[in-house]
Amino acid sequence: MRRSIGRRALFFAVATLVCVALVPATPPELRWVDWATAGIGAFWAILLAFEDLLRPHPPARIRARKPEPSNPFGPPPFPGSEGP
């Protein structure tokens, strides 16, 4: 069975890369913000990836279409026609 990483983990991984890429453009006194944000993003990316990879997946099954419920009402009258 093939397992994949979800969109949440990929989002935080990309956000972490963006934060690390912004480190050289950040003033030296504020670089701790980039590193802290990158650390938090990496933390969540790793946890969410583990969650996606370790979660038990139900076996794939084919679902039959449910029958459409019958409608107890008739169709509406056409516009401009006179009602009963």
Image (cartoon, rainbow, N blue to C red):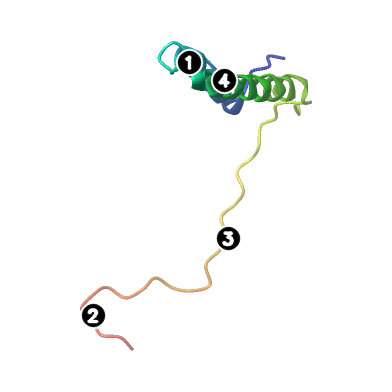
Q: Residue at x 50, y 20 (%)?
A: 29
- Residue at mark 3 to residue at mark 4: CA–CA distance: 60 Å
Give the alpha-carbon distance from disc 1 to disc 2, as whole Å: 76 Å
Q: Quadrant of residue 70?
A: bottom right
> Which circle's residue, 3 or 2, is located before the other in the chain?
3
Looking at marks 3 and 4 on the same chain, the residue that comes earlier in the sequence is marked by 4
Circle 2: element type: loop
Q: CA distance from mark 2 to mark 4?
A: 72 Å
Q: Which residue is mark 1?
A: 28
Q: Are marks 1 and 2 in contact (CB under 8 Å)?
A: no
Q: What is the CA distance from the residue labelled 3 to the residue labelled 2? A: 28 Å
> Would you say the residues marked 1 and 3 are in contact, meaning their CB atoms lie under 8 Å apart?
no
Q: Which residue is mark 2?
A: 81
**Amino acid type of disc 4?**
Trp
Q: Which residue is at 64% across, 40% downward?
A: 64
Residue nearest the observer in this picture, 61 or 36: 36
Residue carrying label 3: 69
**Label number found at residue 32:** 4
Q: At x 70% / y 26%, what residue is drawn?
A: 60
